[in-house]
Image (cartoon, coloured by chain):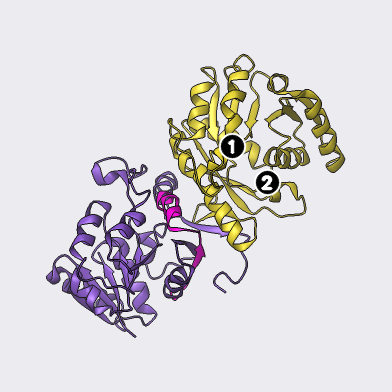
Chain colours: A purple, B yellow
């Protein structure tokens, strides 16, 4: 199995995802702007999940490690999203699946973490779609899963991942990967433009977390058993 | 107990709420632009919940029936929200609690039900706050509860109501009323401005419902037992 590249895996969400995916047997190519930092993160991850297959790379090399039909998870701060994607323009290749988890929190420009920035394209995910080479398949997901819960491997997750994208097949591919992690159920929430709401749910959960001192997640009720048939 | 006024109770969400609240022993003053239509709705509701105390009024009279410290639930189409509130300017009195459930779906101006309109104030609830007399306490809630599930009294609800408002006490009052309905749990989601996200969740659920042919609701995970202590 080709590795899944996680761009920004030194950050909290990316690191938690790396651990959880590695636990399920997925090799993880950890990407960072700085290859040495990526190597450190890979070592740190390996100490926590000894059976995991982690490798550290600069971002472009991590995307390369994912292979021509591979999956790249983009898990960076909003303030770095555009620059990161610009730098990956020659690394990403048509056919790759990009799962964007970027959230345009107002905190990116010194605002509150409970407020969102307006993104001209509608959402961070739509901005990503505009920036990647044609043929790279973009879906958005994972915004509402708390980094703290992911990183705490003793913590049952038991929550939904809201997946948006313009292609049902691409969303299904993303779901098949993400649902390897026990306790994460993926729900098809519609087109990529719906990402403006799933991204905003992160700010809402941050408000809820602050109020109740928890790491809340989302669960949709009354859904059928088979969500990706 | 003073009646709770439901403005727009001839609509699907308002009607379902009227039934569910009446089941718990809350008298319901059904408001409509047309008093005769309100009377019809009250009769129809009484046939479904024979123990319920329903009365029909024009909107202003329904607000009056709720009493000086009473609760008014605003459950109208977005396209009618501003006009309705303008007409209630002399009916609403300081101290009353207004629970706004309005969702600015793009369908209000012939767009898709999975898209939202931008409201200058940020959300329909903030527009409501701007329009009511000073001293009327505004919270937003109930957007994500499906009208179909509310109206089907055999249907267990088992979902959360996302409550936003600038006063914790006002939110608590709204929660105390709404949580009389079995299966509805109210969660404090922050200030009234957060309503732009809770309102938008409705469009997202409409997309999910279309995809899966269900009436989905929301549940937040990992919350403590006591949410309004």
The answer to whether B119 is drawn above or below residue B88 in the figure is below
Magenta-colored stretch includes residue B136: no
State left or right for residue A132 relative to residue A143.
left
Q: Is residue B188 visible?
A: no
Query: Residue A15: percent from the left, percent from the top?
Result: 29, 67
Give the residues in magenta.
A179-201
Q: Is residue A32 visible?
A: yes
Q: Are marks 1 and 2 on the same chain?
A: yes
The chain under label 1 reads B
**CA–CA distance between discs 1 and 2?**
12 Å
Q: Quadrant of the C terminus of chain A?
A: bottom right
Query: Residue A40: percent from the left, percent from the top?
Result: 17, 72
Mark 1: few/some/many CA within 10 Å (<14, 14-19, 20+): many
Q: Which mark is residue A49?
A: none
Q: Secondary structure at mark 1?
A: loop
Mark 2: few/some/many CA within 10 Å (<14, 14-19, 20+): some
Res B212 quadrant in image: bottom right
Which sits in the foreground, A229 or A33?
A229
- Label 1 belongs to which residue? B101
The answer to whether A87 is drawn above or below residue B181 in the figure is below
Which sits in the foreground, A216 or B115?
B115
The answer to whether B65 is drawn above or below residue B7 in the figure is above
Q: Quadrant of the N terminus of chain A?
A: bottom left
Query: Residue B21: percent from the left, percent from the top?
Result: 72, 39
The answer to whether A81 is drawn above or below residue A29 in the figure is above
Task: Report the residue at 54% width, 25% height from top.
Answer: B137
- Label 2 belongs to which residue? B147
Task: Report the residue at 70% width, 37% height from top.
Answer: B11
State left or right for residue B208 relative to residue A23.
right
Task: Report the residue at 46% width, 53% height from top.
Answer: A194
């Amino acid at each position: 199995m080709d590795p899944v590249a996680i761009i920004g895996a030194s950050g909290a969400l990316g690191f938690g995802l790396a651990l959880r995916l590695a636990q399920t047997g997925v090799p993880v190519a950890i990407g960072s702007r700085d290859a040495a930092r990526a190597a450190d993160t890979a070592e740190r991850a390996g100490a926590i999940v000894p059976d995991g297959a982690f490798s550290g790379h600069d971002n472009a090399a991590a995307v390369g490690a994912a292979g021509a039909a591979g999956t790249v998870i983009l898990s960076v701060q909003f303030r770095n999203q555009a620059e990161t994607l610009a730098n990956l323009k020659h690394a990403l290749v048509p056919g790759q699946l990009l799962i964007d988890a970027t959230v345009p929190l107002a905190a990116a420009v010194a605002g509150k973490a409970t407020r969102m920035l307006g993104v001209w394209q509608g959402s961070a995910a739509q901005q990503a779609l505009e920036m990647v080479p044609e043929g790279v398949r973009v879906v958005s997901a994972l915004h509402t899963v708390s980094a703290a819960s992911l990183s705490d491997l003793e913590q049952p997750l038991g929550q939904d991942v809201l997946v948006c994208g313009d292609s049902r097949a691409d969303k299904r591919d993303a779901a098949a990967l993400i649902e390897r992690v026990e306790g994460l159920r993926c729900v098809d929430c519609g087109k990529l433009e719906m990402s403006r709401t799933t991204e905003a749910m992160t700010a809402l959960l941050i408000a809820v977390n602050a109020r109740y001192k928890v790491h809340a997640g989302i669960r949709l009720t009354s859904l059928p058993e088979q969500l990706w048939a």
